[in-house]
Image (tube, rainbow, N blue to C red):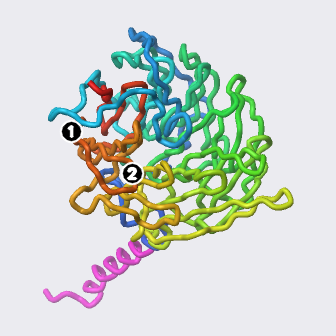
Amino acid sequence: MKKSFVADLIPMAFAVAGVASLMYLWFSADAAVSVQERLPGGDGRPANAGAGDEAIKIQGTLTKGVGVPADLPGAWPRFRGAAYDAISTEEVSFSRTWPAEGPRLLWSIEVGEGYAGAAVLEGRVYLLDYDQVGQADVVRCLSLNDGKEIWRYSYPVKIKRFHGMSRTVPAVTDKYVVTMGPKGHVTCLDSKTGEFKWMLNLVKEYGTVIPQWYAAQCPLIDDGKAIIAPAGSVLMMAVDCATGATVWQTPNPDKWVMTHSSLVPMEFGGNRFYIYCGGSTDAGGVVGVSAKDGQVLWKTDQWRVRTNVPMPVVIGPDRIFLSAGYGQYDFGCTMLRLTESGGQIAVTSEFIHPTSVFSTMQQTPIFYNGNIYGVRMDKQLVCLDLKGEVVWTSTSANTFGSGSYAIAGGVLYVMDDEGVLTLVEASPSGYNQLAKAKVLDGIESWGPMAFAGRRLIVRDLNRMVCLDIAGQ
């Protein structure tokens, strides 16, 4: 039988409707979702989906383990170490060469899927992990000596895989450890016993929108206060670690939203403040918030990126280096300079270079002895001068991907995606490779490094190892 004209139109109508729906979804999607440079893996689910499903206050469980705190030197008490600069100041003779098998393995543990790095203090290793079977965030305290668990504190949070789960590094003092979970649960515990102190649910209490790929902001503890940027109903806040009471809050009139960037403190013009890169529908900006009372001391929109991951890098007494990636081609890096007049702080940009000159996707560059070192979007290790101009690159013959890097003993430790650790001279004289060895299984080896004495702690997606990197 011959089809009617109406019957022919029915499938055409469904096809047109389908295309229109796809076009609507495409153009209405958040810019952070549609960037071209995406982390491998994931199920395409927005990171903040279901972020506020849990109750405001979650009952956790403390479990004791058999581990014992190590009587060993060394500390790495927060993201990028004590000075926020990813530079070890340990007085250790680090090895500049390795045997074929690489540095000696001291211990190894299995960890939940993610990229969260370790913090180290007083012979204890702290890790914000995720228990996929038990569906819970887990704050783990391990022995630096052998990796055995001293205690763990867990609380139930349902998370689906989205480029891994955990990403943040705890902040720890001799009294407290503060963590931020993938869905914005900020938890404070006794750093020695694991005893619960307080918790904030940033989504429920402050209207935080968890960014794409889950929260990656690493908390900091300063003068007994936890400093957090909810970027919701308040932009930033200080919480007394002992009591959980709010010390101050910074309003958020521009409605900036949370990015993956972490806070870093700086002192200038007699003021101590915290620098934060916030996002918004029109890309946000950078702010300096007073450590004393939470007042905004300066703010600029000269750096406007939607997907900001690296932390600001303090350069000397008055400059701040910023970098980004993920398709923001006109904003690869910039140098902000602060000036003070009449008690007011002004901000100017000395340069803004496109990503073709320098940009970073995940890791934060390092300022060391007058130069800046980082892995560029083309995966090459690069040395920059303070004008943002390239001094040298590792060339396309030596690439490193999205792995972390840090400096110890004047040497860059650079991890690549496949778990290969490379030693490179931290010098503007050129790319000088000293040693290379495969130390991890090589599944997204992106977790930030931690140094403690003669030990280096690194991880990939599912495994964390402790290496002996001292001269033999």
Look at discs 2 and 1 and give the one toward the viewer: 2
From the viewer's perspective, is 310 left or right of 108? right
Q: Residue furthest front?
A: 429
Residue 283 against residue 450 in the figure, above or below: below
Examine the structure image and report whether residue 16 is included in the region drawn in magenta: yes
Question: Mark 2 or mark 1, which has the lower sequence index?
Answer: 2
Give coordinates of residue 79: x percent, y percent: 50, 38
Q: Give residue 341's position: percent from left, percent from top.
A: 82, 61
**Which part of the image, by quadrant, shows the N terminus?**
bottom left
Can residue 292 be seen? Answer: yes
Query: Can you identify the residue that label 1 sits on?
Result: 438
Determine the secondary structure under disc 1: strand
Density class for disc 2 (Cα within 10 Å; few <14, some 14-19, many ≥20) is some
Which residues lie in the magenta part? 1-25
At which x and y percent is residue 333?
50, 64
Q: Secondary structure at mark 2?
A: loop
Q: Give the x, y percent position of residue 66.
A: 39, 8
In the rendered structure, which amino acid carries the disc numbered 1? Lys
> What residue is rendered at 31% in x and 29% in y?
469
Q: Which mark is residue 427?
A: 2
Identified at 55% across, 51% down, the residue is 313
Residue 27 within the magenta-colored segment of the rendering:
no
